[in-house]
Image (spheres, rainbow, N blue to C red):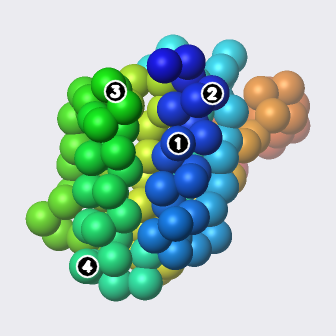
Amino acid sequence: METEELRDLVVQVLEDMKAQDLKVIDVRGKTSITDYFVIASGTSDRHVKSLAEAVAFQAKQKGEPPLGTEGLNEGEWALVDLNGVVVHVMQPRVRDFYQLEKLWSVDPEAAEKLVREHGSSGT
């Protein structure tokens, strides 16, 4: 399965399971660990776990078993690593705290400009 097809499968599963605030971030050229991050919120521990488990199950059914999963027992932040697509499902307060969208959506040139203007020490 092509990476884009896998990404689309993940998005469809999450939409079908009523995930909230679904975002897809293309991280090609920013990291070598994956091509896409799919980030979504669940409404409770149980919803987060159900979303992540459904993604893992459907990917496996399509011949793309996860390389790994994390956080399924806790339900605050679950991760499903599908190699070309890494799925993060979080409760809103956890998502707000870590702000992965901001971290991975930063334009590399803009980030470099900020470092030059403000120094790398952050002061």
**Residue type of the residue flagged with mark 1:** Leu
Instruction: Identify the residue position indicated by label 3 in the image.
Output: 64
**Residue type of the residue flagged with mark 4:** Arg
**Residue type of the residue flagged with mark 3:** Glu
Q: For the residue labelled by badge 2, is the local secondary structure a helix, a strand or a loop?
A: helix
Spatial CA distance of label 2 from label 4 is 28 Å
Q: Nearer the viewer, mark 2 or mark 4?
A: 2
Instruction: Identify the residue position indicated by label 1 in the image.
Output: 9
Instruction: Let me know if residue 33 appears in the view.
Output: yes
Identify the mark nearer the N-term, 4 or 3.
4
Out of 28 and 119, give the one closest to the viewer: 28
Q: For the residue labelled by badge 4, is the local secondary structure a helix, a strand or a loop?
A: helix
Q: Which mark is residue 89?
A: none
Identify the mark nearer the N-term, 1 or 4.
1
Instruction: Identify the residue position indicated by label 2 in the image.
Output: 4
Q: For the residue labelled by badge 3, is the local secondary structure a helix, a strand or a loop?
A: loop
Spatial CA distance of label 2 from label 3 is 13 Å
Among the 4 quarters of the image, the one containing residue 42: bottom left
Q: In this rendering, would 82 be left or right of 68? A: right
Q: Nearer the viewer, mark 4 or mark 3?
A: 3
Instruction: Identify the residue position indicated by label 4 in the image.
Output: 46
Q: Residue furthest front?
A: 61
Identify the mark nearer the N-term, 2 or 3.
2
Identify the residue at image location x=23%, y=43%.
69
